[in-house]
Amino acid sequence: MKVSRYNYHQQFGEEVDSLVGDLRRMLLEGRYILSEEVNAFEQSFADFLGVKHVRGTNTGTDAIAIALMALGIGRSDGVITQANTFNATVTAIRMAGATPVLVDADDGTWLMDVSQVAAAVTSRTKVLIPVHLYGKPTPMLTLLEIARQRGIHLVEDAAQAHGARIHGRVAGSFGVAGCFSFHPSKNLAAAGDAGAVATNEDFLANRVDMIRSLGQRTQNEHIVPGVNSKLDALQARILSWKLPHLHECNSRRRIVAGWYRERLLELPLSFQAEGPDEEHVYHLFQIRTDGRDALLSYLIKSGVDAVVRYPIPIHLQPAFADYGWKKGQFPVAERLAGELLCLPIRPDLSISDVDYVTDCIRSFFCNVRRRAATA
Ligand SMILES: *Cc1c(COP(=O)(O)O)cnc(C)c1O
């Protein structure tokens, strides 16, 4: 038996030929750049989120960098995020020319440790970027209060959290900007790279418009420094095709996560803490165990496509060595990097897939215990 992490065929449903017909027309008619298909997706994703504007970009990394540039963030400005995020959050801060400042992860939620943020704020801090990691929305009330009191912008990295909700609102709609990725691995997946900035602010949407198009207001009139990073029209058409199914796909993911939690309850492992007033969208289903590496190889041998996200925390990545972070500086992020394991999760995963994966995990722990008892 094999249990894989992705099933792209299923994401397109039975009617895929009609989508392919649309893409064929676009190819032949030359509708590639900021065409009506891009506008249509931006509008429907804005409606999905309940925000005023969405602007598509080439990647989720660019979405974050462009949001920061649009806020006027640059050299000598500090941007706070967490030590246990995906590389892209911090790379985007660097792309905007700002300095990343890290706080540790929370040991229970595996999100930003919100209680460390106030102490990390200095006079140079301009932006706070919580990451709604693995699809779990970050508790926002304390962060909103710090941002308000200290005059800091809140920009959300919602690249793993399309449609997640907390405090009755959708992730990505709390801050001045919410940034999304539509990388093929994400809950809403393009057939290549794609990203977007969501915002309720007219000025920010206008700035993002210009910055993503080399800073131009009208053709050949370049009024601000920019980059070239626009959502591709073919990707936009594909995203519009999938978007109507996103809610349903997210609820299926929650059901699968429930099966996992139920079946793994009595084993020596733990789960991402669940908050009261939230809807997790389970981009990833993570378990935590100190036997992680042995369990990973056991699962791989058994045909289960488990994977480690992310084995090296930000502060220990060679790419960021110039920031001078030290081993031991963010101990929770370091422990999580050594103990978290992603089990396959997809909207179409069946209960027998989940039974197989959880049976494998149970027999792994039985063997470990038996070996320990006879040793
Ligand atoms: C995927 C991801 C991004 C952006 O990724 P792209 O591949 O550039 O679209 C940013 N932050 C997080 C947490 C992500 O998972």
Image (cartoon, rainbow, N blue to C red):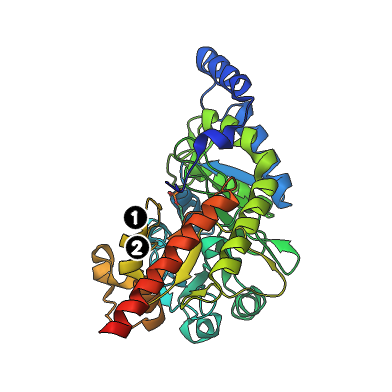
Mark 1 is surrounded, within 10 Å at the Cα level, by few (under 14), some (14 to 19) or many (20 or more) other residues, namely some
Q: Which residue is mark 1?
A: 300
Residue 319 tag number: none
Identify the residue at image location x=73%, y=45%.
47
Q: Is residue 263 above or below residue 177?
A: below
| Residue at x 25% of width, y 84% of height | 375
Label 2 sits on what residue type?
Leu
User: Observer-nearest residue: 329 or 150?
Assistant: 329
Q: Position of residue 100 (x, y in %)?
A: 39, 69
The residue lying at 57 percent from left, 45 percent from top is 188
Residue type at mark 1: give it: Ile
Specify the label residue 296 is tagged with: 2
Asked if 362 appears above or below 225 in the picture, the reply is below
For the residue pair 67 and 48, the one nearer the viewer reads as: 48
| Distance between mark 1 and mark 2 Cα atoms | 6 Å
Q: Position of residue 27 (x, y in %)?
A: 51, 17
Q: Secondary structure at mark 2?
A: helix
Mark 1 touches mark 2? (CB < 8 Å): yes
Label 1: state its secondary structure. helix
Judged left or right of residue 250, residue 130 is left
